[in-house]
Amino acid sequence: MSDETITVLTGDRPTGPLHLGHYAGSLAQRVEMQKGDGRIFIMVADSQAYTDNIGDTSKVSAAIPELVADYVACGLDVERCTIFLQSAVPELAELTQLFMNLTSVTRLQRNPTIRDEIKKRGFENSLPMGFLSYPVAQAADILGFRATHVPVGGDQLPMIELAVETASKINRLAGRAILPEPTVVLSRVERLPGVDGKAKASKSLGNAVFLSDSPAEVKRRVQMMFTDPDHLKVSDPGKVEGNVVFSYLDAFMTDRERLADMQAHYRRGGLGDGSVKKELVAVLEELLAPMRERRPDPVAGRDFCLQVLREGSVVARDVVAGVLSEVRAGLGVLTL
Ligand code: ATP
Ligand code: MG
């Protein structure tokens, strides 16, 4: 990408360490995009994390600098990207408050990702307002930077749809194009499954290979992965579809020819799960070993990570303050 009019906004909730699902779904794209001329904003979404962790803020506090360490480990360049803390940009909260008036409660209740997450968190009978409305805040995060591109996993599609809708409502009310309608950038791997065979590897479920895992942990988690339950003997023909080990190979193996050979061999029989898992461990190590080298020390590097956020948040505030005043003016809101 070489267009300097590109603005990227994306981020993660500081609820635990990042995993391979994040890498495949979003981080790898960010690392690629930072090579272009566009502006890249990466948000540590602490306010969003509080929507379902308000009783456990110490977990979020600990995860904040660790998330920045994960970014550095992945190869995100703190000089090229503006990495900031959501709650350190209060203008985003003000924009959220305005946007709340443009979306109905039923519209949010219909959001399939939210419905899923409500069930997962047992919020059916007591749904925090902040949680239900976090997609509105997410629209503010995206539009507050006039983001044109949002690299996220497939679960975020309904959120981006709401951001597009909100931009178009603001523009209509203002009678001019104040906010660009953002485009979602989906990676080839929209949703990496969990090592336990669940549809999505997720921080909260802990069913993932984490970017900070040691070689022994990586090996252990690969050993846990589901394969084809009917592939009992090595000579049995096996299924590649729905086989977690092959899903991971498909996501991370760069030698596509070798992968195609392995898939064909497994399908016709004669390739054991042990050999496939061994190959996967090697593929993952190739990806994760350089990340271990780049990772700031969890203790000594903590201040550096917080300083990255402090500096990024000053830059981010400046950008969002400008957009907020334009939105207010566009809506005809009186400013004293
Ligand atoms: P939580 O369980 O706390 O919601 P999470 O694992 O879903 O955590 P988020 O911080 O909500 O992680 O998501 C950050 C980004 O990573 C989003 O763009 C999301 O779509 C993407 N992502 C998360 N898990 C996966 C996955 N398994 N496959 C592909 N993308 C993913
Ligand atoms: Mg999530």
Image: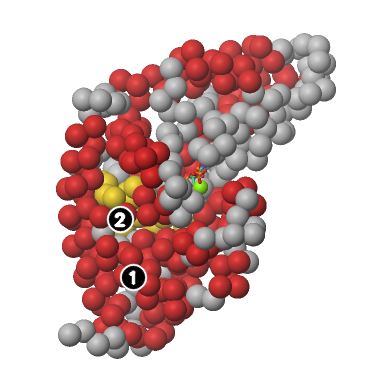
In which quadrant is the C terminus drawn?
A: bottom left
Cα separation between marks 1 and 2: 13 Å
Q: Residues within 10 Å of mark 2 (few under 14, many from 20)?
A: some
x and y, in percent, of residue 166 in the image: 44, 73
Determine which of the numbered discs, if any, sits on residue 95 in the image: 1
Q: Secondary structure at mark 2?
A: helix
Please name the amino acid that badge 2 sits on: Ser
Q: Secondary structure at mark 1?
A: helix
Which corner quadrant of the image does residue 245 belong to? top right
Position of residue 293 relative to residue 102, above or below, is above
Q: Residues within 10 Å of mark 1 (few under 14, many from 20)?
A: many
Which corner quadrant of the image does residue 285 belong to? top left
Please name the amino acid that badge 1 sits on: Leu
Q: Is residue 238 left or right of residue 207?
A: right
Q: Residue furthest front?
A: 55
Q: Is residue 149 left or right of residue 305?
A: right
Q: Which residue is mark 2?
A: 87
Q: Is residue 136 left or right of residue 263?
A: left
